[in-house]
Amino acid sequence: MTIVRIKSPKNNTLTDFAEEKLAALAEAGRRRVLHETATLDGVSVSRNGKNYINFSSNDYLGLAGDARIVAAAEAGLKELGAGASRLVTGNHLYYRDLESRLSTYLHREAALVCGSGYLANVGVIPALVGKGDLILGDKLMHACLIDGARLSDASFHRYRHNDMDSLATLLKKHRADHRHCLILTESIFSMDGDKANIKEIKSLCDRFNAWLLVDHAHGLGVMETPSEPDILVGTLSKSAGAYGGYVAGSNTLMEYLKTATRSMMFSTALPPTVIAGAAKAIKVMSEETWRSENALANARYFSSLMKLPKPESTIVPIILGSEQLALAAAAYLEEQGILCVAIRPPTVPEGTSRLRISFSALHTKEHSEKLAQAVQTFLSKAQVACAS
Ligand SMILES: *Cc1c(COP(=O)(O)O)cnc(C)c1O
């Protein structure tokens, strides 16, 4: 008797499963790998023994390696881990200073710091809305806003990117059937660098009795803080050059979120050294406004060299379309000593793979010129027109 072993997906091992998934990703040109990268200074990194000018970091203000901030973090290094969540024994005295600086900087009554920007969104959104409520979010908003919306059990629809008619249509269609309504957007969109029309969104919120949550991840320290949102969410990991997430709003709202944000309640507090460094970063950010001015001027200079529209932020996308073309562009730049990682689905929609260039306060004119030259050479070689 012969025994036929049928290899069905049901009895595959987990390793078989992973192998199939990896093969499918490779087939689609979406297999990703981790590259060991060492930071040399605010704008250069080394990979495999080669040095690059870095145009893919979100350290827009060049604060991650700032000696004063590193010194503040070092001074806060009495122990490494916090040992428990903030509600247990992890609420280090440094939090008070960081949260008061943040709330002042953001012009809000209070701020609450949590593990990361991702954790802030997946924790805060379900604390605000649930079953029977409505969430409307921008089509291009960040994955963690989407994940927060999904976790909340509220009914969830997305409006066309920055399209107020689309938002108004969804409000007219769905608002009346739900108790609370929360609108989600980013202040500056992470992969496109454009700004949300927060004033108009807010007036729709007023008209339809909805709350507005704005993710300020790429706006902190780079643009003026919008006054309209009922609640701001953001990260200390980008322009603040540190790590961690935050929420800001009224005293009462923050008081409520302390005992309603599951990602904060059930996750260990930040290492005290990080809180100390982040507090110093907010101080430096608020005093040295030349940093954001430089970063924005660099983005504008590059865009003018490339004859692209004037950028609204420190982020300039060069949309190339296919994954293959974006990867080829990134590979060409790498040969030229420039690190600018190709951004592909699922981070951006199908057919919009791109170079996402982020400018820092510490880039020089020469850096931007070298980048523009290299991108133009690639585009003429590949014979494609670039759209932004
Ligand atoms: C990076 C980012 C986050 C996540 O912040 P982390 O602190 O890195 O987890 C959240 N929202 C947006 C829009 C982001 O770009």
Image: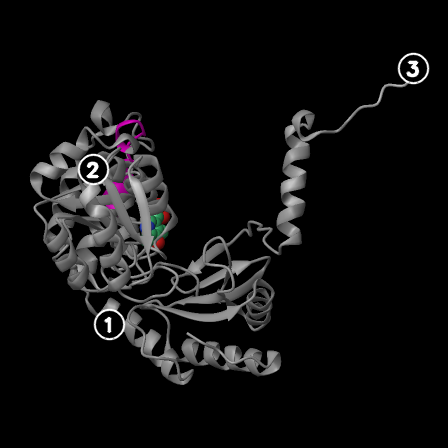
Q: Is residue 8 magenta?
A: no
Kind of residue sitting beneath label 3:
Met
Residue 128's mark? Answer: 2
Quarter of the rendering containing residue 323:
bottom right
Task: Residue type at mark 2: give it.
Answer: Leu
For label 1, the SS is helix
- Tag 2–tag 3 contact (CB < 8 Å): no
Location of mark 1 (residue): 293
Which image quadrant is residue 21 in? top right
Whether residue 75 appears in this view of the structure is no
- Please tell me which residue is depicted at 37% across the width and 65% down the height of the picture: 192
Which amino acid type is shown beneath numbered disc 1? Glu
Which residue occupies 52% across, 68% down?
A: 321
**Quarter-of-image position of residue 22:** top right
Q: Nearer the viewer, residue 323 or 100?
A: 323
Q: Disc 2 vs disc 1: which is toward the camera?
A: 2
Which image quarter is the C terminus in? bottom left
Quick one: label 2 or label 3, which is nearer the N terminus? Answer: 3
